[in-house]
């Protein structure tokens, strides 16, 4: 419990300490895999926002790792939603073609690699998914209207999934 008399700085300090306590058990695993913790946290924050539920997290982490290792842009809606914020249509309003032109280092449609900072506070399941991603050849994924994930190894397969599950 946080005392009401705590200053904002003290509250932030408490939050950081608690986060570090929770993350510490995973730091060794990331170090063993030669992954810096800021990188792991950025990816986990994207996984946290992109997943329809905890069962999706390992596959999304696997797809993100595949794209990063292949030098592909991530093309992630959640990073662009973070950059855009709430412009009166709700924080998580659908991404438009104009949104994809937004000049921001968080726009992974324009810029390759990870955003400069995490886009959310990742939970343990997202951190675990980044440490133990699903082994997949997939480079693309989407969620259908029932929040079921569908992945594809090629862009043509992804276009087929869009046609099949989203139209």
Image (tube, rainbow, N blue to C red):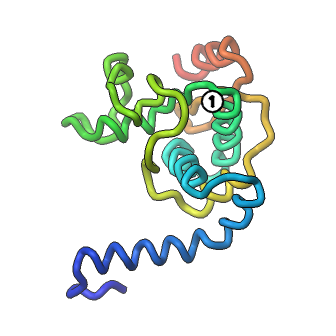
- Which residue does the image show at 44% across and 52% down from the upper left? 120
Residue 113 figure quarter:
top right
Whole-percent x and y of residue 49? Answer: 49, 46
Residue at 62 percent of width and 14 percent of height: 159
Residue 106: horizontal and vertical position, in percent?
41, 36
13 to the left or right of 40: left
**Residue 52 seen:** no
**Residue 166 image position (x, y, % from top left):** 53, 21
Q: Which residue is mark 1?
A: 141
35 relative to 71, above or below: below
Task: Give the total of numbered labels.
Answer: 1
The correct choice, above or below, for 17 with respect to 134 in the image is below
Q: Is residue 120 above or below residue 23?
A: above
Q: Could you say whether the residue bearing mark 1 is in a helix, strand or loop?
A: strand
Residue 67 located left or right of residue 48: right
x then y, percent, for residue 162:
58, 18
Image quadrant where residue 4 sits: bottom left
How crowded is the residue under tag 1: few (<14 C-alpha within 10 Å), some, or many (20+)?
Answer: many
* Quadrant (top left, top right, bottom left, bottom right) of the N terminus: bottom left
Residue at position x 40%, y 74% from top? Answer: 15
Q: At 52% from the left edge and 39% from the top edge, which residue is drawn?
A: 114
Evaluate whether residue 72 shows in this view.
yes
Q: Which of 25 and 49 lies nearest the eye of the viewer?
A: 25
């Amino acid at each position: 419990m946080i005392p009401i008399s705590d200053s904002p700085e003290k509250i932030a300090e408490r939050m950081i300490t608690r986060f570090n306590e929770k993350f510490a058990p995973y730091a060794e695993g990331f170090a063993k895999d030669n992954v810096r913790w800021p990188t792991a946290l950025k990816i986990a924050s994207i996984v946290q926002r992109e997943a329809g539920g905890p069962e999706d997290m390992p596959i999304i982490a696997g797809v993100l790792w595949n794209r990063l290792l292949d030098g592909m842009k991530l093309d992630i809606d959640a990073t662009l939603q973070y950059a855009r914020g709430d412009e009166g249509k709700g924080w998580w309003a659908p991404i438009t073609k104009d949104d994809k032109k937004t000049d921001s280092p968080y726009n992974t449609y324009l810029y390759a690699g990870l955003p400069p900072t995490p886009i959310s506070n990742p939970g343990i399941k997202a951190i675990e998914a980044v440490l133990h991603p699903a082994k997949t050849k997939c480079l693309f994924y989407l969620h259908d209207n029932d929040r079921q994930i569908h992945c594809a190894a090629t862009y043509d397969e992804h276009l087929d999934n869009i046609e099949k599950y989203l139209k």
